Amino acid sequence: MEKVTEKQLEKWVDHIRIYANNGKVADYIPALKRQNPEINAASFFHLDGECVQAGEADYFFTIQSVSKVLALAVALMNHGEDAVFSRVGKEPTSDPFYSISKLEVEKPSKPINPMINAGALAVTNMMSGKTTDDMLHEILDFVHLLTGDETIDYDKEVAQSEYNSAFLNRSLCYFMKQNGIITGSVEELHDVYTKQCAIQMNVKQLAKVAGIFANEGKDIETGEQLIPHHYARICNTFMGTCGMYNQSGSFAINVGIPAKSGVSGVIMGVVNDVGGVAVFGPALDKQGNSVIGVKLLEIMSRYYQWSIF
Ligand SMILES: NC(=O)CC[C@H](N)C(=O)O
């Protein structure tokens, strides 16, 4: 298969810039509203270790919902499949990521999957640490392990801004607490969740993380199994079926790779046995996915024939 070259990537990133006009920066988290819609960046991490990038590849953004995949991997490694899936389902949904409706109608009342907010909150509630700091560090330590970069931290301003305004997410938690899906303090859970969403990375670091999911959970340089293969597969499957929220179906048709987006405007994509891709551009479509991110992945998938279908 032809390799992704920096020259080609630069050409595409330049070409898709204009599509940012079709979207809107997320504004329900006040600190995200300030993001510049013109910024865009992309990176591809090949499984032979070569990393190419284009645009503002050193720009740090918060990973937001991409953290849902990482927390899920940690929860699976800590507790195993049965425990995790006793608290969260495995099915896709046509509801938006912040929806509460299925919690009320589904019996038993567990969140439909771990890629929507309710499911992710239930997963974060499974971190083993005793204090909120320990819980956050389980996720951060995992990010450090995958990237090999211990300087990665969270953006305090974005975390605080979401913490101050996340009333809908609190409602999801109270609903789940009433139904025995989560335990403990809702405020403490929010403290951890908003900080995990505010973990800061650039596209190069995130493309490397995606590369590990594309490499059966193994470190790209050393081959060390960082995530058990079966759990990496579960994460990839969730990305493939639910990672783009209620756009996962059309994304599967148009792109056809496991991917996870976040409302900051990031998308992480997994090209199995080939490499990991990360794209950033803060203007979002109606479903909350980066407009230029989706566009770029459509172009790349078509050109390199990445679709798994
Ligand atoms: N789609 C997203 O990226 C959502 C993440 C965001 N922190 C929230 O919970 O609303």
Image (tube, rainbow, N blue to C red):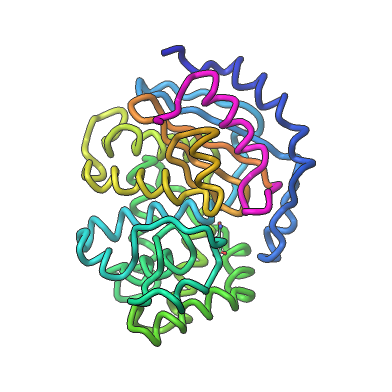
- Residue 129 in the image: state x and y as whole percent: 29, 70
- From the viewer's perspective, is 227 left or right of 290? left
- Residue 292 in the image: state x and y as whole percent: 66, 37
Q: Which quadrant holds the N terminus? A: top left
251 relative to 7, above or below = below
- Residue 104 in the image: state x and y as whole percent: 46, 79
- Residue 54 in the image: state x and y as whole percent: 61, 26
> Residue 126 magenta-drawn?
no
99 relative to 173, above or below = above
The magenta span reads 283-309
Q: Quadrant of ligand 1?
A: bottom right
Q: Quadrant of residue 157?
A: bottom right
- From the viewer's perspective, is 57 left or right of 93? right
> Residue 294 magenta-drawn?
yes
- In the image, 277 versus 97, the foreground residue is 97
Residue at the (49%, 19%) spot, across then down? 304
- In the image, 181 versus 48, the foreground residue is 181
Residue sticking out furthest to the bottom: 178
98 relative to 269, above or below = below
Residue at the (62%, 53%) spot, across then down? 287
Residue at the (41%, 31%) spot, across then down? 309
Q: Quadrant of residue 91?
A: bottom left
Residue sticking out furthest to the top: 2
Picture mark count: 0
